[in-house]
């Protein structure tokens, strides 16, 4: 009974063995059978798996430890993967006894195929190698090519996968990036500048426009303070005065979101200052207006009985008077003064022209502090210089528990920390609602270069304050090495700022 069952199975095995052993063709000095082809396919799959695992291991465990960025890791791993695949394709045939010299004919046929029917594939292949080796774009870069804007997710040998800002994955042939101009927002550094165009009506106050644009840029937290924003008067347009606001960001994928937020802030700042954004308009000139005047002519007073105005006219006139009275501008509080008016209250800037005031607005910004608010804290690092435009502040030492001085409109503070390179030596607290002109460290040099009088005044005031702080024990004798503190401070300013 068992022999009857085993016999068909043996016959089936023998039949399968014979099928797999049948010679199909000869190539490279070796007879190809179905069994050999299966082994070659299995060996090829094994080479692909080993190459992929090895390149991924190198990328995750070695390149990451050496501090390579994401794009470089992906490029090196991809090139290593392709090298291992090519190496395996050369080794596997020799293991199975296939002579590689016979592959020259096949290589020639493949070359002819690439030249004729596979031109596009060859183009994509070479473009992919170019992208991986030269790395004009890398995985993780935020790029813009024509209407495509997104983040590079993967660079393959034939195509590149880009994820747009809306989360859609776009598969782009590699030659598209080689043949077109690429804007790489992440190239070498993620910090990039963004230009925001804006037009204002003719007759607008250019200093107010500049102030509004700077205020909008500085109110957006994602706009960098260094490099500082810039405002350029681009051109006299057909219907508007054309400006450009240059801002710097370090998050290129959020560029559109940041520009949108700044545009909202610009609209708010323009509305607060009654700055008009015009729309395109055309002037119509009528050469023969007599006919039009006859059609639009209003009834004269003599056309009415007794040369009297209609009864409603008196009511309308009275209402117009009331409306006019209601629309008369009311005096603004100091909090609503323009920065130009506030700066001109300070003795150093009272004779500045509009051009000089516009440069001042580039160097700093206005900030409102409520009464009792801390402006800067003792022992904090100094990063800003302050000019008091209105109100008053108290300077006191928390360490010594002692009141030092009060500062009023026109005076300044915060310079000692910047010029001496020491932490804040005192705490500043507002005594009433106050408006400060804040200048950060990067722009202090520009301010002192253009206003030497302020630099001299800072030197004199700093020398006085240094002596008072030394008496409180806040500065040591090693802080200065000369008997003349004023000369030492002037030398210090000249050394730091070149003035």
Image (cartoon, rainbow, N blue to C red):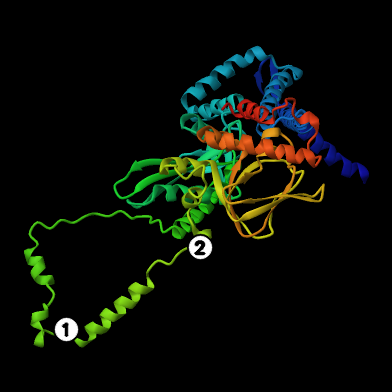
Q: Quadrant of the C terminus?
A: top right
Asked whether residue 54 is in view, the answer is no
Residue 32 position in % (x across, y down): 69, 23
Relative side of 213 to 141, left or right:
left
Quadrant of the image occupied by residue 431: bottom right
Residue 360 position in % (x across, y down): 50, 42
Residue 372 versus residue 360 in the image, above or below: below
Single out the residue that lies furthest toward the front.
483
Distance of label 2 from label 1 (alpha carbons): 43 Å
Residue shown at 27% from the left, 55% from the top: 281
Residue 369 versus residue 303 in the image, above or below: above
Can you identify the residue that label 1 sits on? 309
Residue shown at 30% from the left, 50% from the top: 239
Residue shown at 66% from the left, 19% from the top: 26
Single out the residue that lies furthest toward the top.
101
Can you identify the residue that label 2 sits on? 333
Asked whether residue 210 is in view, the answer is yes
Tell which tag, 2 or 1, sits nearer the viewer: 2
Residue 260 position in % (x across, y down): 51, 52
């Amino acid at each position: 009974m068992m022999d009857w069952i085993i016999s068909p199975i043996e016959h089936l095995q023998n039949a399968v063995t014979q099928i797999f052993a049948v010679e199909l063709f000869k190539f490279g000095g070796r007879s190809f059978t179905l069994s050999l082809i299966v082994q070659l396919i299995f060996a090829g799959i094994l080479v692909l798996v080993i190459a992929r695992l090895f390149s991924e291991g190198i990328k995750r465990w070695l390149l990451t430890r050496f501090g390579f960025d994401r794009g470089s890791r992906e490029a090196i791993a991809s090139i290593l993967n392709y090298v291992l695949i090519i190496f395996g394709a050369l080794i596997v045939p020799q293991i199975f006894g296939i002579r590689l010299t016979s592959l020259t004919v096949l290589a020639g046929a493949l070359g002819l195929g690439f030249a004729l029917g596979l031109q596009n594939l060859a183009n994509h292949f070479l473009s992919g190698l170019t992208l991986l080796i030269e790395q004009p774009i890398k995985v993780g870069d935020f790029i813009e090519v024509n209407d495509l804007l997104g983040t590079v997710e993967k660079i393959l040998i034939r195509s590149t996968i880009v994820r747009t800002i809306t989360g859609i994955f776009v598969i782009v042939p590699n030659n598209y990036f080689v043949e077109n101009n690429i804007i790489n927002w992440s190239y070498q550094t993620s910090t990039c500048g963004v230009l925001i165009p804006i037009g204002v009506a003719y007759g607008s106050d250019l200093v107010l426009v500049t102030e509004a644009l700077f205020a909008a840029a500085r109110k957006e937290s994602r706009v960098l303070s260094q490099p500082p924003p810039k405002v350029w008067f681009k051109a006299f347009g057909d219907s508007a005065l054309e400006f450009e606001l240059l801002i710097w960001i370090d998050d290129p994928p959020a560029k559109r979101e940041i520009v949108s937020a700044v545009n909202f802030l610009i609209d708010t700042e323009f509305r607060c200052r009654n700055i008009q954004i015009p729309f395109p308009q055309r002037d119509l000139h009528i050469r023969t207006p007599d006919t039009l005047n006859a059609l639009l002519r209003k009834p004269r007073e003599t056309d009415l009985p007794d040369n009297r105005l209609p009864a409603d006219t008196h009511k309308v006139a009275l209402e117009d008077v009331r409306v006019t009275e209601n629309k008369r501008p009311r005096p603004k509080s100091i909090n609503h003064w323009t920065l130009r008016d506030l700066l001109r209250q300070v003795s150093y800037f009272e004779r500045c022209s509009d051009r000089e005031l516009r440069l001042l607005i580039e160097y700093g910004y206005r900030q409102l502090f409520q009464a009792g608010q801390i402006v800067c804290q003792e022992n904090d690092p100094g990063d800003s210089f302050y000019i008091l435009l209105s109100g008053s502040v108290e300077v006191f030492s928390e360490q010594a528990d002692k009141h030092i001085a009060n500062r009023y409109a026109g005076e300044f503070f915060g310079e000692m920390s910047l010029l001496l390179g020491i932490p804040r030596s005192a705490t500043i607290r507002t005594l009433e609602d106050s408006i400060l002109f804040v200048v950060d460290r990067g722009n202090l040099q520009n301010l002192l270069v253009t206003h030497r009088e302020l630099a001299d005044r800072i030197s004199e005031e700093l020398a006085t304050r240094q002596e008072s702080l030394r008496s409180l024990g806040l500065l040591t004798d090693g802080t200065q090495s000369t008997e003349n503190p004023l000369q030492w401070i002037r030398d210090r300013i000249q050394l730091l700022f070149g003035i």
